[in-house]
Image: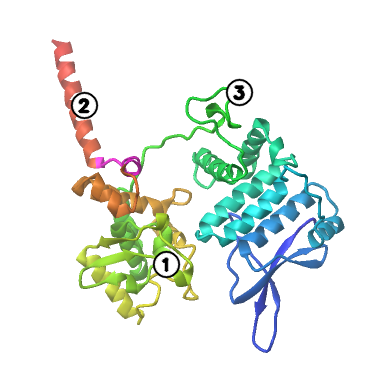
Amino acid sequence: MIRRVRLYARLRQPENKYPRVPVEFDRNGRPVAVKGDVTNYYIRIAGKFIDAGADLAYAVSRMQTEQARLADGVPRQEVFQSASHPVVRDKVPGRVRLSDAVAEYKAELRTLDKSKATKMVYVNAIDSFAKSCRKEFLDELDRKDILTYIDWMRENLPVRVPGAQSQTLRNRLTYLGTFLGKHGVQLKKSGQRQAKTDPGLLFRTDIPKNMKKKPKKYEQSTIETLLTNADEDQKDYLEFLLWSGFRDEEVQFLQYSDFHFRNSTVMVQAKPHFGWKPKDQEEREITLPTAVTKRIKARMDRRKATNSDLLFPNQYGRPDNHLIYRLHAVAKKAGLNLRGKRAGHMFRKTAGSRVAKLEGLPAAMEYLGHSNIATTALYLAADTSSLKKKLKSVDEIYEKHQLVADQ
């Protein structure tokens, strides 16, 4: 017997037709947007459909919850009945059930002025905690429940960037801490207060240690190889990444109207019609090299685009959530393997490192849109030319030492 829960989207089509089509998921488990006018989502269990609302994030969460119950051995018919007719449990005065708190928090998230990506990471964090936890009430939570959650994440979360899982675990604990904090449960013990009787569930030593990696950027030879193997459209994308320092989402929602071609500048600004805002709600303006601005203007003319058009849309003219695949395609053609290496983000580091070297850290902080200069300092990669100078200096010292030793 196939123990599976499927998610479907209901589409509005001409002539009052409303077909249901399955929602596909990419290799990272993220839902792929369904083409067309989606009116609602449904979960299919035991051959029957359950209304999961109009919000995709919520529908995915519902599907994952029921899928987990099936995996635990609950019969399909029982899962269908409980999903269709949730059991109404009496409230216990002074106590809050974990499941109720999760449902309330997710409903609250939908009303907050946050990006879809931000809402999704919070939903994923609390949903996965609810899956790993066997306690019914929030006031029953203890340190062992959080340690169990950490183990659950290590076993179940995919590792997209080798060596970066600890940072993912730390991020999810932060999101979980925000959720628990709203109900008066302190997740981490603060400062030097690390005694058993101090507030907080986790000791400092319980939190996964993040391996501090030395920031890296692309070597000039790698950049030249990529540009040599790119076609005209791909060069537009690579050149813009290299000289703008834009984040992935900032590029996804970039329109020609964001450019001031005469001044050779481009703006990062909110796009209410796409439901998108810049990180930390901060807009900024970047000055581009004249050659890059001319390339973008030529792209606009070549594609007969209007000011309202996206610079790098998907095939349907919508924001492309998979821009990184364009870089992967060029890398594959060039015989380079950039998968799993945050390849697009390294362009941003390369651009920021260049600005820091020429104009200093404050200029790089403003250029990258950071709110803290310490973040910029940790973010930037060392200049390889400086490393070559160091090597030359060390070799000279070594040779002098050898001469003294031989005498």
Residue 406 falls in image quadrant: top left
Q: Which residues are magenta?
A: 374-384
For the question of whether residue 398 can be seen, the reply is: yes
Residue 123's spot in the image, x, y percent?
60, 53
Determine whether, in the image, residue 89 is placed left or right of residue 297. Answer: right
Residue 56's spot in the image, x, y percent?
62, 64
Q: Which residue is mark 2?
A: 394
Q: Which residue is mark 3?
A: 196
Q: Amino acid at mark 2?
A: Val
Q: Quadrant of the N terminus?
A: bottom right
Rounded to the nearest angstrom, the CA distance separating label 2 from label 3 is 50 Å
Q: Residue at x 25, y 36 (%)?
A: 387
Give the color scheme: rainbow, by chain, secondary structure or one colour: rainbow
Q: Amino acid at mark 3?
A: Lys
Magenta stretch, main secondary structure class: helix
For the question of whether residue 327 can be seen, the reply is: no
Residue 150's spot in the image, x, y percent?
61, 37
Q: Which residue is mark 1?
A: 253
Say which of marks 3 and 1 sits in front. 3
Q: Is residue 192 above or below residue 298?
A: above
Q: How busy is the neighbourhood of tag 2: few (under 14 within 10 Å), some, or many (20 plus)? A: few
Q: Indicate whether residue 212 is drawn in magenta.
A: no
The one nearer the camera, 376 or 112, is 112
Q: Indicate whether residue 379 is drawn in magenta.
A: yes
Marks 2 and 3, the one that precedes in the sequence: 3
- Give the SS element for disc 1: loop
The one nearer the camera, 316 or 362, is 362
Q: Which mark is residue 193?
A: none
